[in-house]
Image (spheres, rainbow, N blue to C red):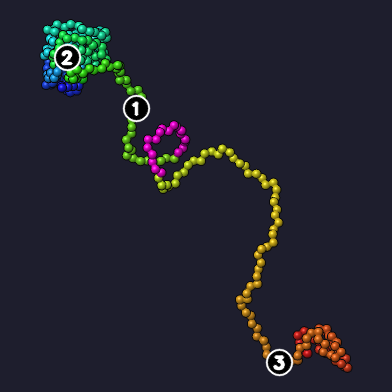
Amino acid sequence: MTTFADSFDRPDSSNLGVDWAEVSGDWAILGGQLSPGSAGGTIILRLATPMATSDHFVQVTIAATTAASHGVWARGNSNVTSGYLWRNDGTEWTLFAVVGGSFTAIGSYTAAAAPGDVAKLQAIGSTITGYVNGIARVSVVDTSVTTGTNVGLRGESTSAIKYDTFSAGDVSAGATLGTAGSAETAQPLMGSKSSTLGTATEVDDAQPLTRAKTGTLGIASASEAAQELTGRKSATLPTASSTATAQPLTGSKAASLGQATETDSAQTLTGAKTHTLAPAGERDTALSLGTPEQPDEVDYAIGEPYALEGTGQPYTTWEAGQPW
């Protein structure tokens, strides 16, 4: 199978390169696009290498257009005097069967070509289909041309027409391609675009929380085991939902004291005190206080003198603890 693609993204030149064969006209690359020149008349360009089979497709992006014939051809001979042509003339797309250099319209779709349109022609067996922007606009069963392996471009030589991004390739015999259901044109980006962020190469310390933000949490895609607490984490306490005011003391409370349960015991004498006594002299035996010495057993009061018998003279005053 053969496939080919060319975006024409190379320096301006009148030489398209070895991949192309200019059947007629002077084709050139200008500003990264393919130009058919401005000489007027119909000109033809084909790939230098044919497709491998007669079942293949060819397509091109029309970068700039005008009300002039231009389009793609497939299943052709070397100069497209045989094959199929899918082209626009400024008012409609028309599918032609080319036999012996004679062009016969076998289907059409009314619409002018617009810049950015992708024109595609596909031939698989007897089914010939013309597409615009991926949508099949004409599809017919035709057996006018059953063989041919050349593909290329055909149109008028005018500077108002430009082509971009050409491609072609074989399609497996018997394969049926589905019809596209719809086509959309890429819209300009009007806002922001998000994408998955890679792993951060720099780590910042967590900043203190200054405000609270709530949001619905998505389902966790992974779980982690609790880690050992290695530091301290603080959190702002929520506002108390209620407060209590201290109440004044309005009364007193009395209680009877019980008896003491603790007593002191006599302490052991831990030291001694001595006193030196004077030597004893001659003395009379001390009388016990209150003990009468006289036969008449007269009691003498302490400190009072008493008289000697028969003399009437007082005797010495008694002192307690003194010998007689």
Q: CA distance from mark 1 to mark 3?
A: 132 Å
Relative placement, left or right, of 242 versus 193 is: right
Q: CA distance from mark 2 to mark 3?
A: 169 Å
Question: On screen, 245 above or below 10?
Answer: below
Looking at marks 1 and 2 on the same chain, the residue that comes earlier in the sequence is marked by 2
Residue of label 2: 74
How dense is the environment of label 1, judged by Cα within 10 Å: few (below 14), some, or many (20 and up)?
few
> Quarter of the image containing the N terminus?
top left
Looking at marks 1 and 3 on the same chain, the residue that comes earlier in the sequence is marked by 1
Q: Nearer the viewer, mark 1 or mark 3?
A: 1
Q: Residue at x 55, y 39 (%)?
A: 240
Looking at marks 2 and 3 on the same chain, the residue that comes earlier in the sequence is marked by 2
Q: Which label is found at residue 193?
A: 1
How dense is the environment of label 3, judged by Cα within 10 Å: few (below 14), some, or many (20 and up)?
few
In the rendered image, which quarter is residue 81 located in?
A: top left
Q: Magenta region: which residues?
A: 209-226
Residue of label 3: 281
Type of amino acid at the residue the image marks with label 1? Lys
Location of residue 319 in the rendering, given as x and y in whole percent from the top left corner: 78, 85
Residue 25 makes an appearance in the image: no
Question: For residue 145: magenta?
Answer: no
Question: On screen, 241 above or below 258?
Answer: above
Q: Secondary structure at mark 3?
A: loop
Q: Secondary structure at mark 2?
A: strand
Location of residue 98 in the rendering, given as x and y in whole percent from the top left corner: 15, 8
Type of amino acid at the residue the image marks with label 3? Gly
Relative placement, left or right, of 25 versus 314 is: left
Location of residue 263 in the rendering, given as x and y in whole percent from the top left corner: 66, 67
> Quarter of the image containing the C terminus?
bottom right
